[in-house]
Amino acid sequence: MTNRARVYCIAGILMATTACGRSYGAPTERRFVCNKFGFTMLVPRGWSVKTIGVLPMFFSFDPGDSIPVIHLPEGGATINMEIESEAPRADSSLQWLRTLRGYATAIAKAGGATDPVLQPVELPVEAGTSQALMASWDLPMRSPETHHTVMVCWEFRGKLLDARLHYVKGDPKGTEHEKVFFETVRSFRPAQK
């Protein structure tokens, strides 16, 4: 291999591993990397990932080009990430939304939960956060099924964020989807600089 070829090869590797919205890792472990917000997380084994803006959305099925997904296929699930709006809040009465509990409650209610019950969730120290909250609820959709949502919210580097799992209520794979979801959330790590 010539020196020029080595330089191109190394440059390609560096570009692939530092771009936001890319995944890397051994075939058994791929990580999504978001440089804008400075985090990485595992791509669940056997799932695909698409970038929505700069954040990941994971699919247990092939979504094709249909995003957002309104109808989940049988046995299908999605996991998506959200980060609080970066727009400054002008109304000081909304200051409670800047707390983890306020943010989690507002997101759950906006997602269809009528009276969300928030429960603490432990994340590993390596995640770079000290506390997290979880809620779950059912949401009737336009299609004949009802979606079940599980959400975990936490604070990271001064931003409030959440991950949400969606699957069809009563799906026999529901327990498996929730296990994958919590493994994915617990894999959240600050990106290496």
Image (cartoon, grey):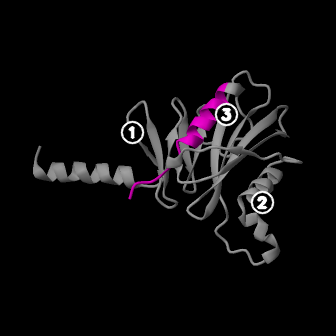
How many residues crowd around disc 2 within 10 Å: few (fewer than 14), some, or many (20 or more)? some
Q: Residues within 10 Å of mark 1 (few under 14, many from 20)?
A: few
**Residue at left offset 76%, top offset 64%:** 97
Please tell me whether mark 1 sits on a helix, a strand or a loop. Answer: loop
Work out whether 79 lies above or below 169.
below
Mark 3 burial class by Cα count in 10 Å: few <14, some 14-19, many 20+: many
> Do callouts 2 and 3 mark residues in contact (Cβ within 8 Å)?
no
In the rendered image, which residue does mark 2 sit on? 102
Q: Position of residue 149 (x, y in %)?
A: 75, 40
Residue 75 pos. (x, y %)? 69, 25
Tell which residue pokes out farthest to the left in this image.
Answer: 2
Question: Where is residue 133 drawn, in percent x and y?
Answer: 71, 48
Please state which amino acid type lies under the numbered disc 2.
Answer: Gly
In this rendering, which labeled residue sits more in front, label 2 or label 3? 2
Tell me if 157 is positioned left or right of 91 in this view.
Answer: left
Calculate the distance from the C-alpha at mark 2 to the C-alpha at mark 1.
36 Å
Residue displayed at 54% across by 56% down: 54
- Distance (Cα) linking label 3 and label 1: 23 Å
- The quadrant of the picture occupied by the N terminus is top left
Disc 1 target residue: 25
Residue type at mark 3 is Ala
Mark whose residue sits in front, 2 or 1: 2
In the image, the segment drawn in magenta is: 176-193
Q: Quadrant of the C terminus?
A: bottom left
Residue named by callout 3 = 77
51 displayed left or right of 5 = right
| Residue 122 can be seen, yes or no | yes
